[in-house]
Amino acid sequence: MNDARRGLPGVDALLGSPEFGELLDAWPRSLVVTSLRRTLDGFRDELVAGDRAVAPEACEIVEATRRELVAGATPSLRHLINATGVPLHTNLGRAPLPDAARAALDAVSRGYSNLEYDLEAGSRGSRHDHCAAIIAELTGADASLVVNNNAAAVVLALNELAESREVIVSRGELVEIGETFRVAEIVAKSGARVIEVGATNRTHARDYEKAIGPETGALLKVHRSNFQQAGFVSEVSIEELTAVGRRHDVPVVHDLGSGMLPDAERAFGFPWEPNVRASLDAGADLVTFSGDKLLGGPQAGVVLGSADLVARLRRNSLLRAVRVGKLTIAALEATLRLWRDLEAARTEVPALAMIGADPVALRERAERLAGALRERCPDAEIEVAADVAEVGGGSYPGLQLETWVLRVTVPGRSERALEAACRRVQPAVVGRVRDGALCLDPRTVLPGEETEFIDSVSQAVRGDG
Ligand SMILES: *Cc1c(COP(=O)(O)O)cnc(C)c1O
């Protein structure tokens, strides 16, 4: 042992020192001891490696132990502020839940619930019944089932309809959505063989007809959620595809992804997006979508359509592996209930409110937040500028939301350093770097987060984070 390592004080001596008194008052002794040991190990490694020449003073050890305690008390999954302007940001947890969904989570998670209990009969019930009535009311579907996510809904549906058989898909719809959902791979996981038809840019009804044979289990149509095709393109509409399916007695599955329930144009004045009602009206046998995209609820997958087929899905043993828990059911049912009144949904479902935010109001809000930040950060230059944002989460490909952002620059600090500093304060603020500035878009900052937003950003910008 060299001299420097010998210079490290012992655990007991440190715990008895006045410097540690405050930490021991604030934290349980066992946690302080564990954190102190870890801190001393770190210093010892540095001394051995020669990264440090002399042993640290007691006050430095106290500070390092305090950081270790705080780090240990910070959860891995935690709240942050989304200032990217992208309402359905998959990396940031997709849709923020409506208040009603949070209240339902609280009510159901505090104690017990009728998750699988029929209160009328006083006997066993099914978790799969809770959302069925509201989904039927909103979509007109005969039957439905809620599973872990849309990927699970697709796998379950195709496993039931086409295990060891064939699923026919257009080459133009073999899409990748996020890193882990590729249509061809998901179909293969369901146990079905993918039969690709058509060309990348054009597929016709006759392409499906030619491929149908005794081994065909289903025709699959997939919404190209995150990109658009333009130019010499044609695809088979869901109406045409269901006509083909009926002629050959093969079920049609429509993976909608985004989960817009009604006609978005008529309901909200948003651009048209494939929707659940239209797909069922067109005769799709099963439709699947996500709970946490345009529906604005928790992560979930909904599969709905023919009563016969849904009854088969309910008997498929794979369902046990992809079923949802009471928290998901509670939050999803409450979110769905908001959709009964589209005016209410528009304001009370945060994802919809953000997508539909009025640019004039967004600009005013950006100006107000910029004013508050300027007061707190005299060295920073903060201007409000027009920009565009996407909806994200695999919905509304190509739609550019008109938005207003705060452009923040500080002389002597790079925009990348500012962006990184915003990620390191508590709560973190995730923004974007664009054209030499840190850009913060208030569209996705929830109304109740404004104070935190100002506190976090000013801390990061002043460099005392
Ligand atoms: C988003 C999406 C999926 C995946 O949904 P998850 O709920 O994330 O599993 C599948 N298909 C389409 C068309 C999508 O847009």
Image (cartoon, rainbow, N blue to C red):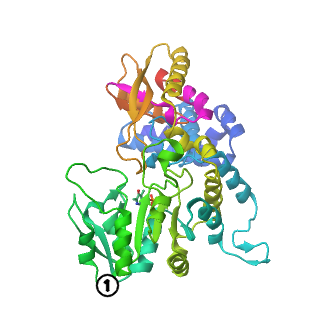
Picture layout, residue 313 above or below residue 84: below
| Amino acid at dot 1 | Glu
Give the secondary structure at mark 1: loop
Residue 56 visible to an observer of this rendering: no
Q: How many marks?
A: 1
Image location of residue 201, percent across then percent down: 22, 57
Image location of residue 45, percent across then percent down: 42, 45
Image location of residue 143, percent across then percent down: 57, 71
Q: Which residues are magenta?
A: 436-455
Which is nearer the eye, 13 or 447?
A: 447
Left or right position of 326 against 316: right
Residue drawn where x is 51% and y is 70% of the image? 305
**442 in magenta:** yes
Which is nearer the eye, 353 or 437?
A: 353
Q: Which residue is mark 1?
A: 215
Left or right position of 44 against 18: left
Residue 260 visible to an observer of this rendering: yes
Picture layout, residue 425 above or below residue 325: above
Quadrant for residue 251, please give it.
Answer: bottom left
